[in-house]
Image (cartoon, rainbow, N blue to C red):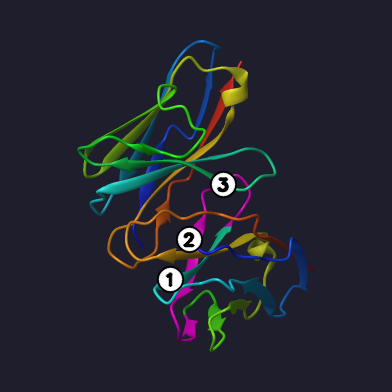
Amino acid sequence: DAKTTQPPSMDCAEGRAANLPCNHSTISGNEYVYWYRQIHSQGPQYIIHGLKNNETNEMASLIITEDRKSSTLILPHATLRDTAVYYCIVRVGYGNKLVFGAGTILRVKS
Amino acid sequence: GAVVSQHPSRVICKSGTSVKIECRSLDFQATTMFWYRQFPKQSLMLMATSNEGSKATYEQGVEKDKFLINHASLTLSTLTVTSAHPEDSSFYICSATPAPNTEAFFGQGTRLTVV
């Protein structure tokens, strides 16, 4: 799986948008970009994934650049409960293992 | 979304004993499940891939005789930590994917403390 690079930590004010970047410059054409988050002492929670097009769901939006070498996860209105470690992962299709990097610690502050 | 359940959520055992952790997919079948270990302030580290009806595939550096994996049905995988030692104390997490090109779902994790 392609390696990803994320900033180690970010702060965001409550109610503002949180924009979390991820670089995956060696991504292959059949690799998806997945985002998960992990709140302390819990299993990771799926957020969103995409291949080429931008995606949006009830939790977040995923913006993937045209060359697919980077992406941004957007939490439109961050709350204190969004404080977590956010992982950007690229993987090929079904059944393939997820390899976690260090992730970004997002701290939402009031 | 799909549900993956782990049991127990927390266990304390004595050094030298064995501990079994269960991972169940509650509303889907999973031919493949994955086991991870996470030490404090570190990321998840993949330990092994559990394959239904066949042997597990272990990542480099993970002792297969110490971490026994059994995937006897399409909804259950078990991880047994044999002859546990304090250095095996960690957060163990499993995951499974219900369908091709979809997200993986994770269990809530098992906190193992070996005393």
| Mark 1, other Cα within 10 Å: few <14 / some 14–19 / many ≥20 | some
In the image, what residue type sits under mark 1?
Glu
Q: Is residue B35 left or right of residue B86?
A: left
User: Residue at point 44% right, 22% down?
Assistant: B66
Q: Nearer the viewer, mark 3 or mark 1?
A: 1
User: Residue at point 41% right, 53% down?
Assistant: A97
Of A94 and A44, the residue lying toward us: A94
Disc on res. A1: 2
Q: Is residue A8 left or right of residue A97?
A: right
Quarter holding the C terminus of chain A is bottom right
Of B95 and B53, the residue lying toward us: B53
Q: Is residue B47 left or right of residue B53?
A: right
Residue, disc 3: B44
Inter-mark Cα distance, 3 to 1: 20 Å
User: Residue at point 32% right, 36% down?
Assistant: B56
Residue, disc 1: A31
Secondary element under disc 3, as helix, strand or loop, is: loop
Residue B9 lies, in percent from the top left, at 48, 35
Secondary element under disc 2, as helix, strand or loop, is: loop
| Mark 2, other Cα within 10 Å: few <14 / some 14–19 / many ≥20 | some
Secondary element under disc 1, as helix, strand or loop, is: strand
To which quarter of the image does residue A60 belong?
bottom right
Residue A67 lies, in percent from the top left, at 54, 86
Residue B84 lies, in percent from the top left, at 51, 17
Residue B113, compared with residue B73, is above or below; it is: above
Which range is magenta? A38-56
Q: Is residue A103 left or right of residue A53?
A: right
